[in-house]
Amino acid sequence: MPARRRALLVLSLLALLGAAAVLLALAAGSFAVAPTDVGRALLGEADGMAGEVVRGLRLPRALAAFACGGLLALAGAMMQVLLRNPLADPYVLGVSGGAAVGALSAMLIGLPLALVHGGAFAGALAATLIVFSLARGDGSWTQTRLLLTGVIVAAGCGAAVALILSVAPEKQLRGMLFWLMGDLGHAGSPWPALLMLAAGLAGTWPFARDLNLLARGDLAARSLGVPVARLRGLVYVAASLLTAASVTTTGSVGFVGLIVPHLIRLAIGNDQRILLPAAALAGGALLTLADTLARTVVAPQQLPVGVLTALIGVPVFLYLLTRNPHGGRS
Amino acid sequence: MIPQPRPTMPAVAQRRDQPPEHAAQNDAHAPQTGGPLLAVRGLEVTVGTVRIAADLGFMLQAGERLVILGRNGAGKTTLLHTLAGMRPPARGTVELCGVPLDAMDPRRAARLRGLLPQHHLDAFPSTVLETALAGRHPHLSRWAWEGPHDERIAREALAAVGLAEFAARDVHPLSGGERQRLAIAALLTQQPLLYLLDEPLAHLDLNHQIAVLNLLTERARTDGVGIVMVLHDINLALRYADRALLLSGEGGVREGPAGQVLNAAALSRAFGHPLRELSEGESRIFVPL
């Protein structure tokens, strides 16, 4: 079957790209490590400085970047189908706003890093619950109501974040701003995010063909036997959890969740069976590359990775939007 | 050719294009013992406080074509969606091949009846062939991908509505009429036993209106599918329907042979505008005064 063979080809290429991005992230930096030494360090053969830098510093950070990029792109693709709006991103329903309020509150009262992550996760879940319970209901306008509720909750969170920033002591501001722009320098262990990415893919991929139909409208999907109400609930909860996992690890990195699904869609079409895993791989590769740039272009100074994804993302997205007039149709 | 004689239908619908592995499955959901495709009993349909139909009962046999007529807002679409199982009736039952719709697995229902919605959403880019292939969803298991067999069905459906050349194109630049024919092709690709069509002639110019009605009639004759369609054109309804269901807009419904239900007095009342019947030999037409 050509469709399935093409899917395998695309996914293999993107997997290679992802692996190359991670290898580059391991090799590049103010302490350059030769590619052969990277391999030896990963196998645990290289001791001393190279092994320490590669295994101890760069590998967790590269894996966290890959996982979060994948999470954001996957969640973005799902949100776009859920809201049937190509301009939706993982943050559109207020998940990142809630996480920001949680994380910044924790920073404000001087909690340790682990609790900042915990605060972010709790805030993200709280925003998700608020939006979901307020927007719940039957009928065709649920989607509009969901979007409106999400946007309003996000606006409320934005105001709370501004309040926290204005009362925060000077020396905490920098950390808060880095968190808001997305920063992998303080990423914790990459494993929760990686596990979440694997679980997210495994949990949603079986419903990918149902999602294809959901994108064609609730009525059409239901008449073809798709349990639309259940599917929408699943997609909403899954996308929110994926976004929460990413935001907890790295703060709100922008644009990955918006442009990666679009890039993939333009390249290979809107079949979610290919789009979901392809977006996860491409998002991972993009954020890994962006983070590598963020810590190397003005080394030893580090830039927040969110700034780089936005600097790359804005022109690419504007270019796509003008080249493809239907991309912005909602 | 007006009025058309009732076709003689085989008790069990003969389906075309079925490979051996699908045959057993189709026998399983073909109407048993020649019973009706669609049986409606004591149906009450309400929207809010407005009653669209009360105590409605009728049956549709394989190969029959039923047209639903009524003025704007009379509840044609709501009734059609109720027949499709898209919304629960206030009272009464809708049975598909002898099984109540509300007790039927949605995927099985989707293999038995197909719905042509009034509006088609294309939020994301998609090719014409992909859009038609959506109709194969209820026939494919969760892990299966569309195979050459499904693609052949979709391409034949596209050819049947004159869109064979469009298969690889994107749906966005299609004209309203082409998009409508694509939606009909997707319904053909679904291969249901009962077609429920909400304004299938919308956006179509005259030649395509007739072509679509001829295509549906041919499917009813050769495959024994049942057709329920909402139409606006009374004269096309008279010419292409075996049965008619006229919604008065105040909860009153008349259902019966098209030639009887569609008369000048009833139509004038239902549409709130006087109509006169002209006849020439066998053919009858209605003209608004």
Image: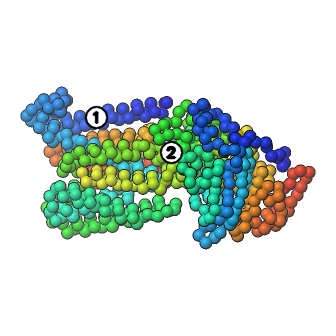
- Pointer 2 and pointer 1 on the same chain: no
Give the letter of the chain under mark 2.
Answer: B
User: Quick one: B115 or B278, which is closer to the camera?
Assistant: B115
Q: Residue furthest right?
A: B281
Residue B256 horizontal side relative to residue B101, left or right: right
B15 relative to A245 in the view: left or right: right
Kind of element beneath mark 2: loop
Identify the disc placed on residue A19. 1
| SS category of the residue bearing label 1 | helix
The residue at 64%/56% (across/down) is B94
Residue type marked 2: Pro
Give the percent coordinates (x, y) of residue B85: 59, 55
Q: Is residue B28 left or right of residue A64?
A: right
Q: Residue at x 60, y 31 (%)?
A: B20
Query: Badges 2 and 1: C-beta atoms under 8 Å apart?
Result: no
**Residue at horizontal 74%, vertical 40%?**
B10
Marker disc for residue B218: none
Which residue is under mark 2? B125
Relative depth, front residue between A146 and B51: B51
Picture coordinates of residue A15, whole percent (x, y): 33, 34
Residue at the left extreme, as displayed = A48
